[in-house]
Image: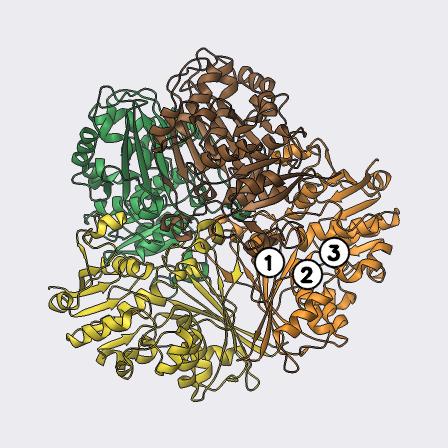
Chain colours: A orange, B yellow, C brown, D green
Amino acid sequence: MSKIPVGLIGVTGYTGMELVRLLARHPALELVRATSRAEAGKTLVELYPYLQGLGIGELSVTEPDAAALSGACRLVFLAVPHGAAMGYAAELLGAGLKVVDLSADFRLTDPGVYESWYGVEHRHPELLEQAVYGLPEFNAGRIKEATLVANPGCYPTSVILGLAPALAKGLIETDGIVADSKSGASGAGRKSQVGMLFCEVHDTFRAYNLGKHRHTPEIEQELSKIAGTDMMVSFNPHLLPVDRGILSTIYTKPVKSLTLDDVHNVYTTHYAQCPWVRVLPKGRLPETRFVRGTMFCDMGLVLDGRTGRLIVVTAIDNLCRGASGQALACANLMLGLPVEAGLDLAPLVP
Amino acid sequence: MSKIPVGLIGVTGYTGMELVRLLARHPALELVRATSRAEAGKTLVELYPYLQGLGIGELSVTEPDAAALSGACRLVFLAVPHGAAMGYAAELLGAGLKVVDLSADFRLTDPGVYESWYGVEHRHPELLEQAVYGLPEFNAGRIKEATLVANPGCYPTSVILGLAPALAKGLIETDGIVADSKSGASGAGRKSQVGMLFCEVHDTFRAYNLGKHRHTPEIEQELSKIAGTDMMVSFNPHLLPVDRGILSTIYTKPVKSLTLDDVHNVYTTHYAQCPWVRVLPKGRLPETRFVRGTMFCDMGLVLDGRTGRLIVVTAIDNLCRGASGQALACANLMLGLPVEAGLDLAPLVP
Amino acid sequence: MSKIPVGLIGVTGYTGMELVRLLARHPALELVRATSRAEAGKTLVELYPYLQGLGIGELSVTEPDAAALSGACRLVFLAVPHGAAMGYAAELLGAGLKVVDLSADFRLTDPGVYESWYGVEHRHPELLEQAVYGLPEFNAGRIKEATLVANPGCYPTSVILGLAPALAKGLIETDGIVADSKSGASGAGRKSQVGMLFCEVHDTFRAYNLGKHRHTPEIEQELSKIAGTDMMVSFNPHLLPVDRGILSTIYTKPVKSLTLDDVHNVYTTHYAQCPWVRVLPKGRLPETRFVRGTMFCDMGLVLDGRTGRLIVVTAIDNLCRGASGQALACANLMLGLPVEAGLDLAPLVP
Amino acid sequence: MSKIPVGLIGVTGYTGMELVRLLARHPALELVRATSRAEAGKTLVELYPYLQGLGIGELSVTEPDAAALSGACRLVFLAVPHGAAMGYAAELLGAGLKVVDLSADFRLTDPGVYESWYGVEHRHPELLEQAVYGLPEFNAGRIKEATLVANPGCYPTSVILGLAPALAKGLIETDGIVADSKSGASGAGRKSQVGMLFCEVHDTFRAYNLGKHRHTPEIEQELSKIAGTDMMVSFNPHLLPVDRGILSTIYTKPVKSLTLDDVHNVYTTHYAQCPWVRVLPKGRLPETRFVRGTMFCDMGLVLDGRTGRLIVVTAIDNLCRGASGQALACANLMLGLPVEAGLDLAPLVP
């Protein structure tokens, strides 16, 4: 059976690389176009020597060109920075392609919110209505019908999945939630910058953008939908000296007296049909290594009776689950494939 | 001028090693006894080859013996596990020595609280009253007069210093504080255990003991004194893949409307006479590498107007400031030396 | 189609864990028995929480028992220390099972050499003759027929693959070869020992066992066969602060004037039918991350005209290619499956 | 006593930062000028927040200007790239200043060799004769008299110190030596480049520039002087995922039968007056962490009787001993201070 041809705009970043890794072993999709202005003319294996022998390396990187892509592909992944993606999306949709955008350009339904957090005017607000937020656990039905999917951010994936059951069931106050998130360095992208050099990240730890990270409005928008009321979250990111992985420790207040059994039941029930969400046994807490290279979102629950808090800890791989793997899951759905095609991955431990 | 002789019980752990490092370059103290049941008979340099040429390596490790120590030393550091320290302290105090205990045995004034959190009966509750909590910024006067100092825990040092100004001035609610703390692996000690092997800690991140870490009652006891009211804290530790360093992100609620200038002024004023506490300029956040190997506690302040929170971020070196360096500062005070003797250290970056 | 049942003795080490990871996604083999004296009675997922949802975690760990294994399996992997494996092998072979031994017990054809390097008497020298050295690139035919495979050591895999073409073609002197090898920490196993704690390995680097590592005679035995003459190698291991990966830098002397083209041709020709050996383009050197989690052995060639040396650099994943993946490749062959079944893996970068 | 004023051209790289660290605690030198074209106008503490409270942070960074420096300083450190240093050196020497150049510009006595390895024409060959190679163990007398010191490279320091005793005593063949060196990432400098991002260096290992690194002619020049004959070395660098540290494993062939006692005696005798060179006890091998932050060069000796090799393993801190600390030692000598002033440092372990 011939594979479905797909394209990728932006192959030089970590999310582009991760898409290539996953597509190299995908049973039903074939990467037939990969673009980069900076590297056009090279083959993929010249860029990434580790692709030798994987059957994908001989593909030549081209300039991004909507016409060429539309003739060759059925769906295109956009792995370019926010601000750059929206234009490509408009062109590609116009040419009849399906699009999965890994940037933030179509995640926020209100273009004013987008502009105030990202500092960029939205040039295609007319597309926002048709964009579907690509969290497969919640939106699978709509993703299947979508032509434009806004792939969730890495931090939002970890926070939204962690809070959804408790909010949906009204277990916790919507006010006063704090998410203390820690991300591996691949989340900062593959731009050359002194602050992300090995010697600036290794053997150290720092907080950054406390209370003002751009993923905040995305988290709040999606949680507000789930909670059925407008809510804010204090979202606070940190930089871990690891390659991959986000661990979010989320502090909430129960609205009433709960037992850990109650909460655990709510979570396992909520995610009973979601094989990628692993609610851990009571007493267990997640670790980023246990989801390395996979689509899993691991989740640990702590009920602290002393201080009256429900603490939810989630772990994902920011590149796979938090970006490229999730984009691929959406593409699977959009193309009529099983959501897990090519994503049935086991974690690499250690 | 001859140096003051001091002893060390427990030389095989990371805090013992850190004391040896600092004493090797101390201008006024000399390590004349170092003990370890397991390693008695070896010289220090046989244990720690990196001591060669530092003028301290030829000291022979001996069995711990109070009589021998009392004849040779004026002060002894206890770097042994909780439960083991209390007995040594009683013996050494009885022999007329001053004692700085790095364990938790004398930190909690209420032996019942000790027993409920540590699961060990306190065999010397009669000593608790004379024990002084060794945080030099707050208790310098009492430390100078003390014969027994309970050296603060590493996490408590990072949390208490971060909250003290705001609590002392009544800026924040005493209820609902969350401390999300992240520590390097040396905090787990130098015991052989599978969970702390390189391949179990490297390139990963995990939470542990959420809401039930033994440093919790110590934090609450000291903060309650500062706040003038009993208070609880939700304290939640995590394990970082770094050697040294604790970063605590502490979430609080202001009792009234504040500006960042207000808060920054309170903090800089509070610590104006404390050279080891560095309140960073507004907009800066601490990083563990910037305090590596030193006594500094760096502190960043964030006022998040959206969610109505004051976030305090602190960074210390858990082995130096959070353990052995702090113990040495206390010893300096107890022996009539300037608090900073031998501790005027510059951070090793990178 | 039903899968072929296999067993694993020794599930608590890193090689056992890696076998479980690979078997969890194997299309034709099913792990039906996993044993550990220490952990018998638990399920795999209780031991390894990251197995949740992989369809393999519910298997219960049992005591190692040859009779039970022989009734349930067609082949058994031995992932226990040298010295312990030989007894299991004898029992299991006696019960009619095929065996792949990941330890060193059957690698050395001369039991005297085994005893002098390993300090253990060989209790089953009668089995040595039937044991096949499990390097699939060279011995595929014999492995297919074997009932007992001695799986190669991790370092030997990296050195033998790197030198084989040059020795087979007589390009280099058999005398004076130096292999300077660097291994990730998983190579030291999962025993609790102070020297392998995170804080003893992280952010540092050391040499160990120079000239006397136990993998030396294995390297020399296999290279002597390839070269057609007895030869010695100066083999010198080092410990890297990484989880996985061996990089060997191998220094040789050409027997005559060569061009890099000559050497490159010899290597690419030699490995033309070996998809897991990737001879890199001239000018490229391997990196351990580029083989992470895979069966690849990457190889870079440098001809240093100034000093008259041919330098071969190889990189493998010590756990996958250097241990469990290679064992699985052998098992595939022994069971009539394609060698690459379940091993068609793409590297996880970053 | 007032301190001697010194200046630093190039404060934004890791060697500049390390000089600032060391000068911040130097008892007799004071940094009075620090320059950077990119950062002129800022204070040091604005650049490096970790300098707060160290008494050096308020110094303002200025444009590099020889006249201003000559009026204010007695000696200037050049911590700028090769090619840029030579012009500054000429100007500053012309203005009557002493100069320690941390670049390669004055290390090679033959400008033709410089040009062929560095690809840059030497614009001040007239200064080469007066430049003294700044290895304090060997050239202390000449350094004291020098106005221009060429500070040794990091790799050369590790290799030259390791081979000097054996070559000086004629114990080993001058032909066929291989140095396999591994360096931490700070050796690559603080330039923004994708290849040195955290995610490109962490948890991986690679060789680079085998046989053609620019430090090769420097190593050969200095060893040839010691050996009394022209010699070549196969020098082969690798990149370690650590911040600081070089470990060199050096393979040599004895000219005659030797015992380890013989060799150890030669080494300990050779370095008897050199407190920074620590010849380890027989059987011990160095580790980079054991010299972290210090001037030590640790040295382990292995005599491999089987293969007839003497292996010397050395470890240094590439930033301190291999660059800025060594430059400071030279400055101490040039300014009439004890060589160890401000450099009596204990390693930070862990």
* Labels 2 & 1 near each other (Cβ < 8 A): yes
Camera-nearest residue between D189 and D130: D189
In this figure, which residue is indicated by the disc labeled 2? A157
Image mark 2: chain: A
Residue A198: % across, % down? 49, 48
Give the numbered dot on residue B102.
none
Residue for point 25% across, 50% down: B47
Q: Indicate the amino acid at tag 2.
A: Thr
Of badges 2 and 3, nearer the viewer stands: 2
Residue at 60% x, 23% y is C145
The residue identified by callout 3 is A151
Mark 2 Cα-neighbour bin, 10 Å: few <14, some 14–19, many ≥20: many
Q: Which quadrant: the N terminus of chain B?
A: bottom left
Residue type at numbered disc 1: Ile
Residue situated in front as seen by the camera: B26 or D104:
B26
Local SS, label 2? helix
Query: Which label's residue is closer to the chain start, 1 or 3?
Result: 3
> Which of the 4 quarters of the picture holds residue A1?
top right
Q: Which residue extends farthest top?
A: C256
Residue lying at 31% horizontally and 76% vertically, measured from the top left:
B106
- Residue where numbered disc 1 is placed: A246
- The span from disc 1 to disc 3 (Cα, nearest Å) is 17 Å
The quarter of the displayed image where residue D307 is located: top left
Tag 1 and tag 3, C-beta contact below 8 Å? no
Q: Position of residue A135 (x, y in %)?
A: 75, 59
Quadrant hosting residue B87: bottom left
The kind of residue tagged 3 is Asn
Task: Judge whether residue D218 can be spotted in this image.
Answer: no
